[in-house]
Amino acid sequence: MQKVKGTLIPIGGNEDKGLEENELYTLEFIDEGILYHVVKEAGGVDSKIVVIPTASSIPKEVGDNYLSAFKTLGCSDVTVLDIRSKKDSEQQESIDLITSADCVMFSGGNQSKITNKIGGTSIHNILIDRYKNDEGFVIAGTSAGAMAMSNEMIAGGSAAESFIKGAVTMYKGLSLIPSLIIDTHFIRRGRFGRQSEAIAKHPDLVGLGLAEDTGLIIKNGNDCTVIGSGMVIVFDGSSLTHNNEKVLQEGTPMTMANLTVHVLSNGDQYDIKNRKVTVLPIEAPFI
């Protein structure tokens, strides 16, 4: 199996963009925030960053927020690529931007918009090729932009109907990292149940629930390190001894036995292939 050379950074949403008036909060963002890590992984403040707000219902405003955030970090080469149709994904200008970027950042919104307007297009193919082959190339995404990274993508689902079959809706994502199912805003929106059902449907995959202002740096398509202020919940269905998802009717409560769940925070690591957790010592510094 080919070793992946690029880096993925899925983010749980509401990452600090340094836009608050409180100076202390802004300084924390610059020193330790998630977008700081995105810039660092892309090669620093001189890297070429392309922001894609396709998932958003207000792409202009979202794009402007990211321009401001990356400017705060000292970045000078940031472009917003406002893709609103598959035709836009085939424009030579779009292709040139994705081909030359050091980092592509997908905004939040509706993840199905990303797959509907970018999936299967020239820039989608370029993203996959560069992620696999270009060392130092970064694809980051927050909220919907993170969820779209997987192949089996959560497209929607009710937290209120957790653990009821049919509470989660699945769709095909961008297949950047097929071994994962990613969910976001995980703690605040109570999405434990819908990620559980997603893993019941696909027990060979690893589920990740990302809290807000929390992300992962994923190297080699496998090695994950937690960044940010919250938690990442890992769902491992490889040891399930009972899983009745396939035989239940829609709307029926589910049973899952021996689902393995890990709660990880800043600096902790996860090996997807070997399903192995490495936690930082208690006295280790925040990264």
Image (spheres, rainbow, N blue to C red):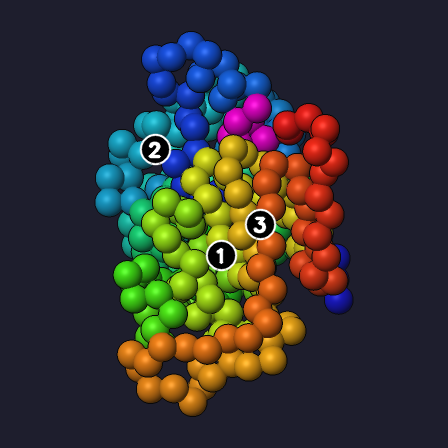
Residue 120: x, y in percent? 44, 64
Q: Which mark is residue 63?
A: 2
Q: Which mark is residue 240?
A: none
Tag in front: 2 or 3? 3
Residue 130: x, y in percent? 61, 50
Instruction: Determine the image quadrant of residue 43.
Output: top right
The structure residue drawn at horizontal position 49% and vertical position 57%, both measured from the top left corner, is 182
User: Does residue 130 appear anywhere in the picture?
Assistant: no
Magenta-highlighted residues? 32-37
Of residues 137 and 157, the one drawn nearer to the viewer in this rendering:
157
Of residues 17 and 166, the one drawn nearer to the viewer in this rendering:
166
The structure residue drawn at horizontal position 43% and vertical position 58%, both measured from the top left corner, is 192
Classify mark 2: helix, strand or loop: helix
Q: Say which residue label 1 marks.
A: 182
Q: Say which residue label 3 marks.
A: 263
Instruction: Determine the image quadrant of residue 173.
Output: bottom left
> Please, what is the three-letter code of the amino acid marked with disc 2?
Gly
Residue 267: x, y in percent? 66, 37
The structure residue drawn at horizontal position 54% and vertical position 47%, both measured from the top left corner, is 232
Considering the whole magenta stretch, tell me its main secondary structure. helix
Tag in front: 1 or 2? 1
233 with respect to 6 (left or right): left
